[in-house]
Image (cartoon, rainbow, N blue to C red):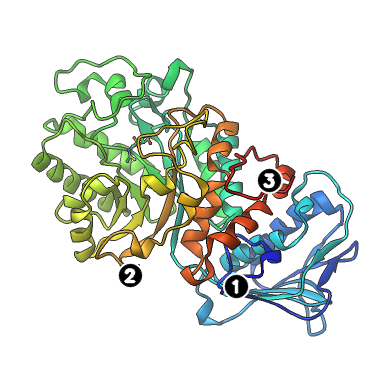
Amino acid sequence: MQPPVDLSVIPAPASARRAAGPGFALDTSTRILSPPGSPAAARVGAYLAGVLRRSTGYPLPVASAGGEGERDGIVLETTRDGQLGDEGYELEVSAVAVTLRARGAEGLFRGVQTLRQLLPAKVEDSTVQRGPWRVPAVRIVDRPRFAWRGAALDVARHFFGVDEVERYIDLISLYKLNVLHLHLTDDQGWRIAVDGWPKLASHGGSSEVGGGRGGFYSKQDYERIVRYAQDRYVTVVPEVDVPGHVNAALSSYPELNCDGRAPRLYTGTSVGFTSLCLDKPVTYRFLDDVIGELAALTPGPYLHVGGDEAKTVPGDRYARFIERVQGIVRAHGKRAIGWQETAGASPPPPVVQYWDIAASADAVRRAAQRGSKVVLSPASKVYLDMKYDAGTRLGLEWAGHVEVRDAYDWDPAKLLDGMGENDLLGVEAQLWSETLRSLRDMEFMAFPRLPGVAEVGWSPASSRHWDGYRRRLAAQAPRWSALAVHYHRSPQIPWPR
Ligand code: TNX
C-alpha cells in the first residue's frame, strides 16, 4: 500500500493510515515523556528534544512518565510486541498525544525520524521559526525489510574530518540507515592511526588524490565517530582494503614490499596496481596488528577486509590469502565482510558485498548457497559517485549515469537470478571520493539519491512506487534547505519552486 502522499515520509512506512481529527500541535507546554527505567530511551527523548528545541524555541522538557494519566505530549513507550523487532515502531497521533512505541530505544529512534518528517519542514531549521507545529493524525506501524541498510564513505581518496563524517551520520540516520561503512585505507591514503605501525598514519595519511594534505583519524577521533554513530543507532563498519589498494601502506613500510623498496605516495586515481607481499611473514604480523587494533575500536560485529581489484595477484593465491585474513578477523572476535571478489574463497566470508555489475555473480551465488549473506551495492544503481547525467560536474562514469530513478526503482530480491530475500542481508550506497573534495561535494552526490536507497532497504516492495516516491522526494527539498544540504535538482523530480 502506497502511503498517502501528503505524509511524505521517506522511507515509506510498512503501513500508514490517516486517522480522524486535527492531529497534535506542539506548544510551549509540550513535554516529552520517556519510559521509566530506560536510560537509553531517555537519551532518545533528549535527542528528539534537541532537534525540536532549535526550531520551535519551546522548552520541551524530557521527563520520565509517571503513573496513569500522564499520557499527553510526546510519549515514548516500550512494548513487548515481538512483531516490531528491534527497529520497528508504532506511531499514533491524536489531539492529546503523539505516542511512539517500540521494543527499545533503537525502535524509538527510528520512529523519531518519522515524527520529524511529519512536522513542517522548517522544524529542521537551526534557528527559531514560527509555528504552528502540527503533526497530522496518523497511525503508523513500521519495521524494516532488511537488517543492513548502509552508506559507505571513502575517506581514503580524499580525507574527511570527524565533523564532516558526523554530519553524514546525521543525514543518513534521518533516513533510517543503520550502517556506516568507512573505507579507511587505499592507495592514496591511510586514514587510521595504528600504534604498532605509526608511519601508516603519519606518512601514509599525508597524501590524497590530487596532491592535497590528506589526514588521518587518531584513535580518539575514531572513537568519537563510533560514539556519535552509536548514539544514532548506526553501526560503523571499518574497512581495511587488502591485499590490493595498499600503496599508502607500502610507501610507509619498505618491509611490506617483496623487493623491500618503498614506492612513493600516490595521488592519482588508477586502481589495481598494488599488492601486499603475500610470501612474507611480516605481512601477516602487519595484518594481525592492524586488524587487532581496529577490532578493539569496533563495538559492532563486522570488519571489512576489502579484497577488491587485486589485479596483480593470481587467483589461487588470492583465495588462500582471503582465507587467512578471515582467520585473523575471527581471532579478534569479528566477522569478516569482503567485496564480491572474496566470494570464491573457501569458505567465503560470512558477508559478501556485491558491486561489480560487469562481472559474473556465480561465485556470489555459490557463497550464498554455502551460507554467506549478501549485501547488494550494484554500481549501476547505488554508486553515488556516478554522475547523474553527462552534465554532472563531479563523479565518475564507469558504471554509467545513475539518475534518481535508477537508484530507487529496483527490487533487491529480483536483482540477481537465484538470489532471493533470504540470501540478502541488505543494501548499501557507496560514495567513493576520487572526485569529491568537500562536504558540499558529498552532499551533492548523495542527495537526492541516498534517500531512495534507504527506502529500497527499509520499505516493503508493496509500499514502493516511483510515481508516489518522486512526489515524496520533492517534499524533502525544503527540509534539505533548512538543514543546508547541498543537493542536485534532478529533472526527474517535481521540485517545489
Ligand atoms: C570501484 S567498488 C572500486 C573503488 C572505486 C570505485 C569508483 C570497489 C570495490 N572498488 O576502488 O573507488 O570503483 O566508482
Assign ligand 1 to one image quadrant. top left
Which comes sooner in the sequence, label 2 or label 3? 2
Dot in front, 1 or 2? 2
Residue type, mark 1 in image: Tyr
In this figure, which residue is indicated by the disc labeled 3? 480
Which residue corresponds to the image point at 47% horizontal and 60% vertical from the top-left?
457
Depth check, front residue: 354 or 47: 354
Q: CA distance from mark 1 to mark 2?
A: 23 Å
Dot in front, 3 or 1? 3
Q: Is residue 44 left or right of residue 58?
A: left
Residue type, mark 2 in image: Asn
Q: Position of residue 77 (x, y in %)?
A: 67, 75
Which residue corresponds to the image point at 50% horizontal and 51% vertical from the top-left?
405
Q: Judging from the image, what secondary structure is the residue with disc 2 in?
A: helix
Q: Is residue 207 visible?
A: no
Residue type, mark 3 in image: Trp
Q: Judging from the image, what secondary structure is the residue with disc 3 in?
A: helix
Q: CA distance from mark 3 to mark 1?
A: 25 Å
In this figure, which residue is indicated by the disc labeled 1? 89
Q: CA distance from mark 2 to mark 3?
A: 35 Å
